[in-house]
Amino acid sequence: MLVDSHCHLNYPEFQEDFSAMIARAKTLGIQRFLTISTELSKVQEVIKIAEGTPEIFCTVGVHPHEVEKEGPPAIQALLTLTHHPKVVGIGETGLDYYYDHSPRDAQKLSFRNHIRVAKETGLPLIIHSRNAEEDILAILREEKIQDMEKPGVIHCFTGTKEFALACMDMGFYISASGIVTFPKALDLQETIKTHVPLSRLLVETDAPYLAPVPHRGKRNEPSFVVHTAEKVAGLKGISLKEVEEQTTNNFFALFGKVKKDLP
Ligand SMILES: [Zn+2]
């Protein structure tokens, strides 16, 4: 079994062939999908998708890119949404100083609010980090993330080795996306190969973006997570089956609210 631990299934790119796309993924052994909120204004769409398919679970949060438009989410609003049985994580949140689509102060406030909800509920954080490693670590420390045993995942990891190690020290998992299959991603490949143990690794697509080789440049979809898992297996010199088993176990260990047995 494989899991796509991060995708955006409510995006319009999937409207036309949604059922066929999910069926394709299931045929390849992808048995759980975590669809990630980026806007609170569309969170009901996301929840509805999770309600519609037993294998799909979801998160609630506001992406750093959307903070300017949506405002930092109120803690209480997020808390209320977490009561839904299909809501299993908080995010995606974090800081993006590469695009700077939202003012940094607002991004930081939003990030803190998400962290507080994660701590209050015990649900893991989905963290997006781009050119903001120092501030991410500083805020996590200030918010006493160490109170959480499994605080979450650094999704679509593209950071430095030092950042990976610091995050894993805090208990975070590291998620590999299609970027790890790109020929020029040598530093990232080295980090995943040498510094992130299989016991801390998740795999994801971030679909519809960032399709892995050999689909690079096309619309990404959950079935393509196989290519990322294959690349990880190649880097680590182990079988695809081992990567599938361990990353799936990691997913269930981190997202304890995801049902192992489905109705
Ligand atoms: Zn995402």
Image (cartoon, rainbow, N blue to C red):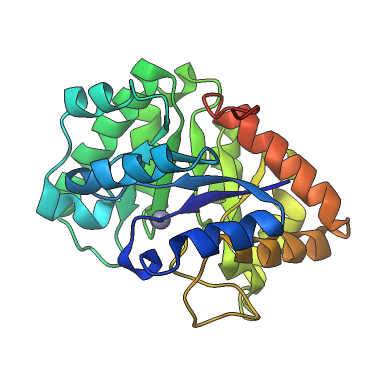
In which quarter of the view is residue 250 placed?
A: top right
- Give me the residue at 40% from left, 53% from top: 129
Image: 19 above or below 41: below
Count the numbered circles shown.
0
Name the quarter where the C terminus is drawn. top right
**Left or right relative to 255: residue 11:** left
Image: 121 above or below 28: above
- Give me the residue at 17% from left, 57% from top: 102
Ligand 1 lies in which image quarter? bottom left
In which quarter of the view is residue 51 placed?
A: top left
Identity of the residue furthest to the right in this view:
238
Where is residue 30? Give x, y as percent. 65, 51
Image: 168 above or below 3: above
**Left or right relative to 225: residue 146:** left
Where is residue 200? Give x, y as percent. 67, 40
Image: 76 above or below 93: above
**Left or right relative to 130: residue 210:** right
For residue 158, say whether it is visible: no
- 204 or 8: which is nearer to us? 8
- 115 or 92: which is nearer to us? 92
- Give me the residue at 57% from left, 55% from top: 204
**Left or right relative to 129: residue 166:** right
Where is residue 173? Give x, y as percent. 59, 40
- 12 or 158: which is nearer to us? 12
For residue 148, say whether it is visible: yes
- Give me the residue at 31% from left, 24% from top: 117
